[in-house]
Image (cartoon, rainbow, N blue to C red):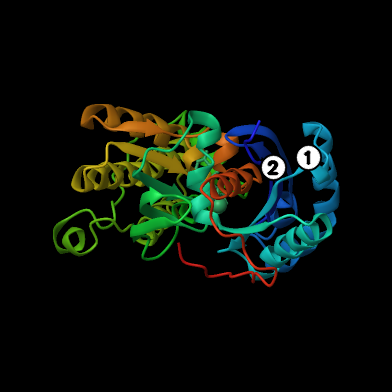
Amino acid sequence: TDEPLVLGIETSCDETGVGIVRGETLLVDAIASSVDEHARFGGVVPEVASRAHLEAMVPTLERATEQAGVRLADLDAIAVTSGPGLAGALMVGVASAKALAVALGKPLYGVNHLASHVAVDVVEHGPLPEPVLALLVSGGHSSLLLVPDVTSDVQPLGSTIDDAAGEAFDKVARVLGLPFPGGPHIDRAARDGQVAIDFPRGLTGGRDLERHRFDFSFSGLKTAVARWVELRQRAGETVPVPDVAASFQEAVVDVLTRKAVDACRSHGVPDLQIGGGVAANSRLRALAQSRCDDAGVRLRVPRPGLCTDNGAMVAALGAQMVSRGRQPSRLDLPADSSMPV
Ligand code: KG4
Ligand code: ZN
């Protein structure tokens, strides 16, 4: 086969991911997470994450190559997330990838974390349509992207002006007494609840919508939920956690799907791809599907395990860069915590 065999390393947040692909075929996606170490702080602690990456890197690399039955010497390239993300955490991955590239004499590809959330979908659904419209929703980002070519041309249409969608899930979960990270817990709690409370949809009307058509805002929603809960608690009432979870979740996914479909329509792009940790949300997946069906938009969402951070997405983007003949990175590739798309 002449498809490139690429190993990808992801350390931008709290997951140490090592994935290996051959072209568009996923061979292995090994992951180690420090999420439990952060849980008692209610958020990711950068220093703890960096240290955990350092400890997990070699064992995760070994697990990946063993499970895939791949020898390092057979790799065609090493890809690594070079930004955006936590500076110290990124540095562990970038330094590891450089060491491998030098030792093996293979090309190094630094990749953008947001682009790789889009690129990973090729291992599930084959080549990306060009262009594709991408909704990227994670703990750190909420963006709408127009993607003519994921290896070289990713255009931001809009993004959150305050909290990321995942961040809002995590903060509201905390208010409801649910563990960190809160997204999956709210998703689960909401299944037993009703959308009974009308929480605000940020940037969806009037001047706000005109000026911020493809932007998001979730901090007003978060505050509204916190205030609603606090009033019940002060009155000595029990808080209907499933109803609050369902109502909050509906407000988030209503706005996300409405704006994503609007972006497809206004840019004449018939394919929508959703990625990032929040794309694992069951209600987001269901509502996106029905709104895309109504609008004649084809929807692509990878399985939940490929939506959250992982190494396969880095390998997948790396392989596409190799196939497209993109220039490898220099060995002084920096970790860029605030890298734009
Ligand atoms: O992409 P990701 O793994 O890491 C970042 O780059 O941030 O996303 C993690 C975020 C967290 O905020 C988490 O609460 C959220 O994704 N998340 C979910 C679900 N699963 C993970 N949010 C809503 N529903 C879910 N099922
Ligand atoms: Zn991510």
Q: How many numbered discs sit on the rendered protein?
A: 2
Residue at mark 2: 19
Q: Can residue 52 be seen here?
A: no
- Depth check, front residue: 193 or 293: 293
Q: Can residue 261 be seen here?
A: yes
Residue 64 is marked as 1
Q: In which quarter of the image is residue 131?
A: top left
Labelled pair 2, 1 in contact (Cβ < 8 Å): yes
Circle 1: element type: helix
> Which three-letter amino acid code belongs to the residue tagged 2?
Gly
Quarter in which the N terminus is drawn? top right
Q: Residue at x 60, y 49 (%)?
A: 318
Q: Local crowd at mark 1 within 10 Å, few (<14), some, or many (≥20)?
A: many
Circle 2: element type: strand
Residue 240 pos. (x, y %) = 45, 39
- Depth check, front residue: 188 or 29: 29
Residue 35 pos. (x, y %) = 70, 51
- In the rendered image of this protein, does residue 331 appear above or below residue 305? below
- In the rendered image of this protein, does residue 204 appear above or below residue 184? below
- Separation of disc 2 and disc 1 at Cα? 7 Å
Residue 317 is marked as none
Q: Does the residue labelled 2 lie within 8 Å of ligand 2?
A: no
> Which three-letter amino acid code belongs to the residue tagged 1?
Ala
- In the rendered image of this protein, does residue 307 appear above or below residue 9? above
